[in-house]
């Protein structure tokens, strides 16, 4: 059997798998499609149920991966083809050019002079970034990358802009870089591609896309984060006012035959975490509309009870967004305990869900 293992996906699962394999003496090839490893955990503010800093936990592991002699990391790379059987696979990997070499010191001068702005994917498009950028401050590899679709230059053609190359002391910017194709023989493959959010626009009853103050829970994570677009201030995108009354809509698309016919098992706990954080950030009234609460892990039920003690309201129902009234979001729902039809106004609405694969 070949003694090399390929790990597909550089999120926390792929990172931990790579470290465990390397510690056992196995050679690892870690393939990640984005410019940096870290995945979704790198974007979170805190973890449940301990509320520990997310990047504080993951950043040392990311650094260990990059400096482990048994691990080869390929970012901006995707698996294109796999042949063979267990113990002997031939894998073809396609890697996009970074246009910045490893001599980059991440000084940031290139970012300052770059004239091109675009939406920042890491901040869920709630903020902007330059055409040359690093996804986040603790990113690994700590080498900048150029978004060639946004950059004014179009290699190998005429280069109308050279601002970044002029200020780069180590001459790390190289527009002559080309895509690469690698072929590896590995004994095993670990698929750690993670999860993605269900597109909330498929759920018109919750109003996502109809109003700027209706966001996904993952977008809310970036608002909570001090390194996010609002530096941790919980304000409404519509007018910049601080949030006073907040609604979480759980189980969006979950156990729905149109989309995900089973429970995601995670949206309860990360929503409870965000609800507690919202309270800690000064939001006075936090309500959670849910189908069922799944608090099944170590310390999870105690975390759920803590949230209720902190004044978070739980209502078993399925709400529907009605519209705006006097600058507030209007929601209609039926209380399953009493059968009462209620209309309530909120400053902000959050959609919580996820689907199985990214």
Image (spheres, rainbow, N blue to C red):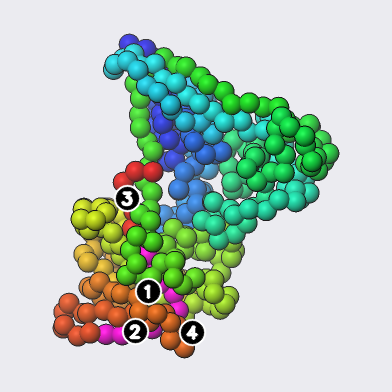
In space, the residues marked 3 and 4 are separated at their CA atoms by 32 Å
Depth check: give the residue in front, 80 or 127.
80
State the residue at coordinates (23%, 63%).
293
Q: Mark 4, residues whose alpha carbon is within 10 Å: few (<14), some, or many (≥20)? A: few
**Which residue was labeled with disc 2?**
344
State the residue at coordinates (28%, 74%).
319
Query: Quadrant location of residue 338?
Result: bottom left
Q: Is 180 colored magenta in this rendering?
A: no
State the residue at coordinates (41%, 20%).
91
What range of the chain is rendered magenta? 342-351
The quarter in which the C terminus is drawn is top left
> Tags 1 and 4 in contact by the CB under 8 Å rule?
no
In space, the residues marked 3 and 1 are separated at their CA atoms by 21 Å
Mark 2 or mark 1, which is nearer the start of the sequence? Answer: 1
Q: Position of residue 151 (x, y in %)?
A: 69, 43
Q: Position of residue 235 (x, y in %)?
A: 54, 73
The quarter in which the N terminus is drawn is top left
Q: Position of residue 192 (x, y in %)?
A: 37, 36
4 w.r.t. 263: above or below: above
Q: Position of residue 231 (x, y in %)?
A: 59, 63
Depth check: give the residue in front, 255 or 294.
255
**Mark 3 or 1: the one toward you:** 3
Query: Quadrant location of residue 218?
Result: bottom left
Q: Secondary structure at mark 4?
A: loop
> Tags 4 and 2 in contact by the CB under 8 Å rule?
no
Query: From this viewpoint, which residue is outermost toward the right?
Result: 166
> Tags 1 and 2 in contact by the CB under 8 Å rule?
yes
In space, the residues marked 4 and 2 are separated at their CA atoms by 13 Å
Return the mark for residue 327: 4
Q: Is 347 colored magenta in this rendering?
A: yes
Depth check: give the residue in front, 204 or 306.
204
**Which residue was labeled with disc 3?**
355
């Amino acid at each position: 059997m070949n003694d090399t293992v390929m790990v597909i996906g550089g999120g926390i699962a792929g990172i931990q798998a790579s470290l465990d394999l390397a510690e056992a003496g196995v050679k690892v090839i870690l393939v990640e499609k984005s410019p940096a490893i870290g995945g979704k955990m790198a974007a979170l503010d805190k973890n449940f149920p301990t509320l520990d800093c997310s990047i504080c936990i993951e950043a040392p592991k990311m650094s260990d991966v990059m400096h482990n002699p048994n691990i080869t990391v390929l970012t901006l790379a995707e698996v294109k083809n796999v042949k063979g059987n267990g113990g002997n696979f031939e894998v073809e990997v396609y890697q996009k050019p970074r246009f910045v070499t490893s001599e980059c010191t991440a000084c940031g001068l290139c970012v300052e002079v770059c004239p091109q702005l675009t939406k920042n994917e890491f901040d869920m498009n709630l903020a902007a970034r330059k055409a040359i950028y690093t996804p986040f401050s603790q990113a690994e590899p700590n080498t900048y990358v150029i978004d060639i679709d946004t950059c004014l230059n179009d290699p190998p053609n005429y280069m109308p802009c050279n601002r970044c190359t002029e200020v780069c002391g180590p001459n790390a910017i190289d527009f002559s870089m080309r895509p690469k194709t690698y072929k590896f023989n590995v004994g095993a493959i670990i698929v750690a591609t993670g999860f993605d959010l269900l597109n909330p626009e498929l759920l018109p009853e919750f109003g996502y896309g109809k109003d700027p103050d209706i966001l996904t829970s993952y977008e809310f994570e970036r608002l909570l984060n001090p390194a996010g677009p609002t530096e941790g201030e919980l304000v409404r995108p519509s007018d910049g006012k601080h949030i006073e009354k907040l609604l979480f809509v759980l189980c969006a698309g979950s156990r729905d035959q149109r989309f995900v016919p089973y429970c995601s098992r995670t949206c309860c706990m990360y929503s409870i975490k965000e609800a507690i954080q919202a309270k800690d950030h000064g939001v006075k009234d936090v309500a959670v509309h849910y189908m069922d609460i799944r608090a099944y892990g170590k310390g999870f039920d105690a975390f759920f009870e803590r949230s209720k003690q902190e004044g978070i309201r739980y209502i078993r129902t399925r709400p529907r967004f009605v519209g705006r009234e006097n600058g507030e979001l209007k929601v209609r729902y039926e209380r399953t305990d009493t059968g009462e039809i209620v209309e309530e106004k909120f400053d902000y609405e959050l959609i919580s869900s996820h689907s199985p694969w990214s």
